[in-house]
Image (cartoon, grey):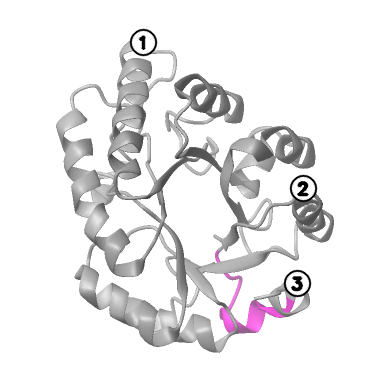
């Protein structure tokens, strides 16, 4: 079975953020991810990770004003300078945590708008090129319209076509199975078709985004398919526990090979 990374923005929230690293390690995880670390100095985040003996699998570049409803800036034609600054903000955190995969959020924009399309393509290309110099892979994640209405990147085929068209070796797809199931279904065929460009995988139960041992996705089969396809990256556990985090980890104890 794949190697799992606990998402500390959603799991172990019973602890303050910097204490979640140790809690995840105590629960048996060898890796973590989260949305944003920027409320804490990079050195403190790196120290918490190191003390817990964990690997950093992924985190997001700064998304703009999250509290005001912004969900990224890459597809916003007038925000190119802020995207570039966001990259420079994230790189020290990647260095402090030895993280080699970052996610760029697209933002809320009409995907049919040519200006948004051009802005996104340019932002992706420039970000990937800058991160390549820091030995970092950039991933793009399609997000479903129910969880994030108005989000620009809401189609897996669109993301895959852009990645193929740009042809940058450090540009990959973030394949969130929860979002894929809601947007398109056909999860396993999507994995088979897109595996050559997949840089990170995430899981959650569908439709309620709780533990992955409940809901409509047969994760035993899907996780086995990742093995059959030769996927050796981390699988991020980006779900909201239905109760206390530790109480819901029965699925992890069955599947983990960390």
In the displayed structure, does residue 148 sit left or right of residue 95? right
Rendered location of residue 29, percent (x, y): 57, 78
Q: Write down the residue under mark 2.
A: 229
Q: Badges 1 and 2: C-beta atoms under 8 Å apart?
A: no
Looking at the rendered image, the disc whose residue lies closer to the viewer, 3 or 2, is 2
Q: Nearer the viewer, residue 195 or 45?
A: 195
Q: Secondary structure at mark 1?
A: helix
Rendered location of residue 112, percent (x, y): 44, 13
Q: Write down the residue under mark 1.
A: 114
Looking at the rendered image, the disc whose residue lies closer to the viewer, 1 or 2, is 2
Q: Secondary structure at mark 2?
A: loop
Q: Secondary structure at mark 3?
A: helix
Rendered location of residue 89, percent (x, y): 19, 52
For residue 255, which numbered disc appears in the image?
A: 3
In three-dimensional space, the C-alpha distance between marks 1 and 2, rounded to whole angstroms, equals 36 Å
Residue bounds of the magenta highlight: 240-250
Q: Residues within 10 Å of mark 3 (few under 14, many from 20)?
A: some
């Amino acid at each position: 079975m794949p190697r799992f990374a606990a998402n500390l923005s959603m799991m172990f929230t019973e602890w303050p953020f910097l204490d979640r690293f140790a809690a995840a390690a105590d629960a048996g995880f060898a890796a973590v991810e989260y949305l944003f670390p920027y409320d804490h100095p990079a050195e403190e985040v790196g120290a918490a990770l190191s003390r817990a003996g964990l690997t950093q699998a992924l985190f997001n570049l700064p998304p703009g004003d999250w509290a005001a409803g912004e969900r990224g800036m890459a597809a916003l034609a007038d925000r190119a300078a802020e995207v570039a600054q966001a990259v420079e903000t994230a790189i020290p955190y990647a260095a402090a945590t030895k993280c080699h995969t970052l996610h760029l959020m697209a933002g809320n924009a009409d995907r049919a708008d040519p200006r948004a399309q051009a802005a996104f393509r340019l932002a992706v290309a420039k970000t990937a090129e800058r991160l390549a110099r820091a030995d970092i892979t950039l991933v793009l994640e399609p997000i479903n319209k129910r969880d994030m209405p108005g989000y620009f990147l809401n189609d897996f085929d669109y993301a895959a076509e852009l990645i193929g068209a740009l042809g940058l070796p450090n540009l990959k797809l973030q394949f969130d199975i929860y979002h894929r199931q809601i947007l398109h279904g056909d999860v396993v065929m999507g994995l088979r078709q897109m595996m050559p460009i997949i840089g990170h995988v995430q899981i959650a139960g569908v439709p309620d985004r709780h533990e992955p041992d409940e809901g409509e996705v047969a994760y035993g089969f899907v996780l086995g398919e990742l093995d059959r396809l030769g996927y050796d990256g981390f699988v991020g556990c980006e779900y909201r526990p239905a109760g206390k985090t530790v109480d819901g980890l029965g699925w992890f104890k069955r599947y983990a090979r960390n």
